[in-house]
Structures are given as structure tokens and as C-alpha cells.
Image (cartoon, rainbow, N blue to C red):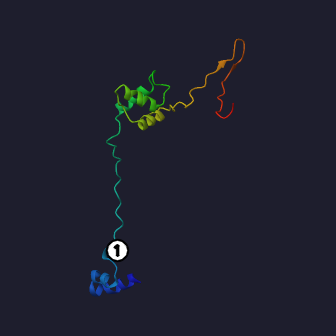
């Protein structure tokens, strides 16, 4: 309806006055009745994060996580041990991300399950942890 009114008034008074008379912003009118196609946005290259670790730094963290001293420890424990020694390599979350990339999940909170013999000549059995509520 407003488009029809603007179309009738445009040849007589011009686009600006026709838009003012109908109460439609001139930019909206031109946007709706664009004669050229919508300009395509150029593809943007992904910008590298400036605070991201470089490849050499990631390799250093990976080497520390896979070292004999830290191989069975969670990245949070490794982080705190390194801080106690006066070394900062990366944040805890970054260490976890690197550990996931090298497909090494954090060790469980209860530790690894060890199989022990009950006594001499007995079969090997796995210890079953007891709940705190059962005597």
C-alpha cells in the first residue's frame, strides 16, 4: 500500500518527498527497491588467535605431558608441579586440550586398578572398593 503511494508520488515530487509524505524512511525504500543484486561478501580468511601457543610451545607442553615423570598425571597436577618448580608453560585448560589432541585422557580419580594375588597359590583378583556407607 505504501509502495503504491510512493510509486504514484515519485514522478510528481521525487523519491525523497514521496517517502516523507508516506512516512517511510528513504533508506528502507531504496533497500526494498534495489535495482542491483545484494553485494556478495568477500570470503574472509580466518585470523590466527594472537595469544595462541606456537607450534614449538605446543610441542614443549606435549613433551612434558608425555615425559616419564608426568605420564600418569592429570594436566592440572602437572601444571601445579611445574609452577612449584618455577616453570609456566600453559594454562590448565590448554594442557587438557593438548592432552586430548594426543589422545591421552586424564587418569581417573581413584587411580589405576591393580590386580593382586590374595595369597600364595591363590588366583589373582581385582580389589573392589567399598562404599563409605557399607561396613
Image quadrant in which you'd find residue 124: top right
Query: In which quadrant will I find the N terminus?
Result: bottom left
Horizontal and vertical percent position of residue 92 = 42, 35
Q: Residue at x 33, y 74 (%)?
A: 30
Q: Residue at x 36, y 33 (%)?
A: 55
The front one of 14 and 54 is: 54
Q: Is residue 82 left or right of residue 13?
A: right
Residue sitting at 28 percent across and 83 percent down? 17
Note whether 107 is above or below 6 in the view shown. above
Classify 48 as above or below 37.
above
Residue drawn at x 29%, y 85% is 11
- Nearer to the camera, 31 or 125: 125
Where is residue 100? Give x, y as percent: 48, 35
Vertical comparison of 72 with 51: above or below: above
Of the pair 40 and 89, the residue shown nearer to us: 89
Residue hosting label 1: 28
Q: Quadrant of residue 109?
A: top right
Amino acid at each position: 500500500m505504501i509502495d503504491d503511494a510512493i510509486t504514484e508520488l515519485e514522478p510528481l515530487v521525487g523519491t525523497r518527498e514521496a517517502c516523507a509524505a508516506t512516512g517511510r524512511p528513504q533508506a528502507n525504500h531504496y533497500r526494498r527497491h534495489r535495482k542491483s543484486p545484494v553485494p556478495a561478501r568477500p570470503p574472509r580468511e580466518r585470523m590466527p588467535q594472537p595469544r595462541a601457543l606456537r607450534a614449538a610451545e605446543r610441542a614443549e607442553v606435549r613433551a612434558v605431558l608425555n615425559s616419564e615423570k608426568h605420564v600418569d598425571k592429570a594436566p592440572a597436577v602437572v601444571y601445579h608441579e611445574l609452577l612449584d618448580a618455577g616453570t609456566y608453560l600453559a594454562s590448565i585448560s590448554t594442557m587438557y586440550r593438548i592432552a586430548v589432541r594426543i589422545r591421552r585422557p586424564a587418569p581417573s580419580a581413584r587411580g589405576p586398578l591393580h590386580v593382586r594375588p590374595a595369597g600364595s597359590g591363590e588366583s589373582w583378583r581385582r580389589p573392589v572398593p567399598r562404599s563409605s556407607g557399607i561396613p
